[in-house]
Amino acid sequence: MDAPAAELAVRLLHPDAKPPARSRPHDAGYDLSSVEALTLGPGERRLVGTGVAVAIPPGVAGLITPRSGLAINQGVHPLNAPGLIDPNYRGELRVPLHNAGETHHEIAVGDRIAQLLLVPFWAPTLTVVDALPASPDDRGEAGFGSSGR
């Protein structure tokens, strides 16, 4: 697998759009900000625009992940976290936000609503087989709770 590109092309599609940005130099995620002002009621979900499009290189996927403070303090998080952005998608990054809290939550233009995490992925050719090879530790088909407490 080739090394990912050192730069990520970002297109601003809206006058209020902000480029994805890391808060600190060693942060993994890039904050995504809203270009919409809205109120999310308890239990409500809305697709919120960021006004940003990106050119993710081949072999890399974008994951839309929650902002931990927004999730724990307000109960607001991306509904399908993590959301997947394929490397061939060039449209606006939009975030399906859900208010799992008990109060209304105001989102202003420019508020950080989620994070973009870029991760390499492996997409091998699939082969249908009659049986899978044994797992290295003999776990086999043991699933939920199989390792004890």
Image: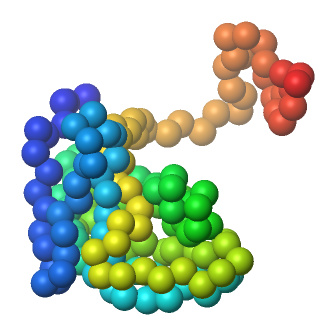
Which residue is at 83% across, 36% downward?
A: 144
- The structure residue drawn at horizontal position 31% and vertical position 39%, both measured from the top left corner, is 27
Q: Residue at x 54, y 65 (%)?
A: 77
Q: Position of residue 81 (x, y in %)?
A: 54, 59
Residue 146 placed where, x, y %? 87, 26
Q: Quadrant of residue 143?
A: top right
Residues 123 and 10: in front is: 10
What sort of colour scheme is used for the picture?
Answer: rainbow
Q: Quadrant of residue 43?
A: bottom right
One can see residue 2 in this view: yes
| Quadrant where the image shows the N terminus | top left
Q: In the depicted view, which residue is nearer to us: 124 or 100?
A: 100
Residue 41 percent location from the top left of the image: 61, 87
Residue 79 seen in this snapshot:
no
- Residue farthest to the top, as pictured: 137
Identify the residue at image location x=23%, y=59%: 20
The answer to which of 20 and 2 lies nearer the viewer is 20
Q: Is residue 83 left or right of residue 34?
A: right
Q: Nearer the viewer, residue 36 or 137?
A: 36
Q: Residue 129, how many percent across, how many down?
A: 64, 33
61 displayed left or right of 22? right
Q: If the image is split into quadrants, where does the C terminus sit?
A: top right
Looking at the image, residue 58 lies above or below residue 1: below
In the displayed structure, 42 sits above or below 1; it is below
